[in-house]
Amino acid sequence: MIDTLNQLDKQLFLFLNGIHSSFWDNVMWAISGKLTWVPLYLILLGYIIYRFRWRSLLIMGFIALLITLADQFSVHLFKEVFMRLRPCHNPEISGLVHIVHNHCGGKYGFVSSHAANTFAIASFTSFLIKRRWYGIFIFAWAALVSYSRIYFGVHYPGDILGGALLGFLLGFLLILAYRYAEKLIYK
C-alpha cells in the first residue's frame, strides 16, 4: 500500500513538475520567496492591530509561537524522522526533475515546512478574522506558495499535503489556545 502511494506521489510530482517554462520559473521563484510576501504580512498585521487593538499583542505572540511550532515540528518531528529524500535528491528520478536556479534545499522533504508555515498562518488567521473572502484568499495563497515547492522540484505532492495538514492542525489548536488565553486575560 505504501509503495503504491509513493509511486502515485512520484508520478503526480513528475507530471506537475514537468509543466514549466522560463517565465514561470521566475514567477514561482518570486512566489516562493520570503520577502515577496512582506507587504501581505504588513497588511495583515495592520488589520489585526486595527481590528483587535490591545488584543493584537496577544495575537502576535500566538502567531510567533505558531510559526515556530510549524517550522520546528516539520523538521524535527517529520523530516528528521521519516528521512524521505526530496525529489531533486532522489537518485531514481533526479535526472527528470526540473530545478530552478540550482536550488534543491536540504536532503529530506517530508513534510514541507513552507506548506506547514503557510497553512498554519492561513488556518489561524481565518479562524480569527472569520470572513469568507479572507479565508478563500489566504488558503489560495497558502496553496500557491506550497505548489511552488513542487514546481521547484523540492517537494512531492505528499510532502505538501502532509505540511498543509500539520499547519492546519497547529493553526486550529493555537486558535483554541488563543481563545482560552483571551478569556483568562481580557475578561
Image: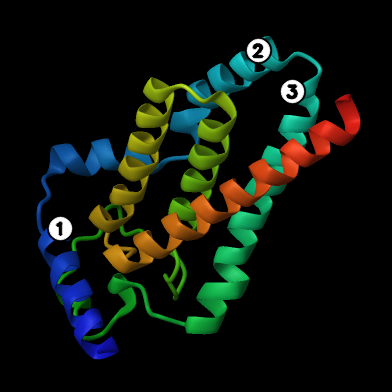
Tell me the crowding category of disc 1: few under 14, some 14 to 19, or many 20 or more residues within 10 angstroms, Cα based. Answer: some
Above or below, 28 against 126 in this view is: below
Tell me the crowding category of disc 3: few under 14, some 14 to 19, or many 20 or more residues within 10 angstroms, Cα based. Answer: some
Spatial CA span between label 2 and label 1: 40 Å
Which of the marked residues, 3 or 1, is nearer the chain's N terminus?
1
Callout 2 touching callout 3 (CB < 8 Å):
yes
Residue 55 visible in the current orientation: yes
Which of the marked residues, 2 or 1, is nearer the chain's N terminus?
1
Q: What label does residue 51 carry, if any?
A: 2
Spatial CA span between label 3 and label 1: 39 Å
Indicate the amino acid at tag 2: Arg
Disc 1 secondary structure class: helix
Q: Which percent across, then down, holds residue 145? A: 36, 43
Q: Which residue is mark 3?
A: 56
Q: Which residue is mark 1?
A: 16
Residue occupying image coordinates x 51% and y 60%: 166
Q: Quadrant of the N terminus?
A: bottom left
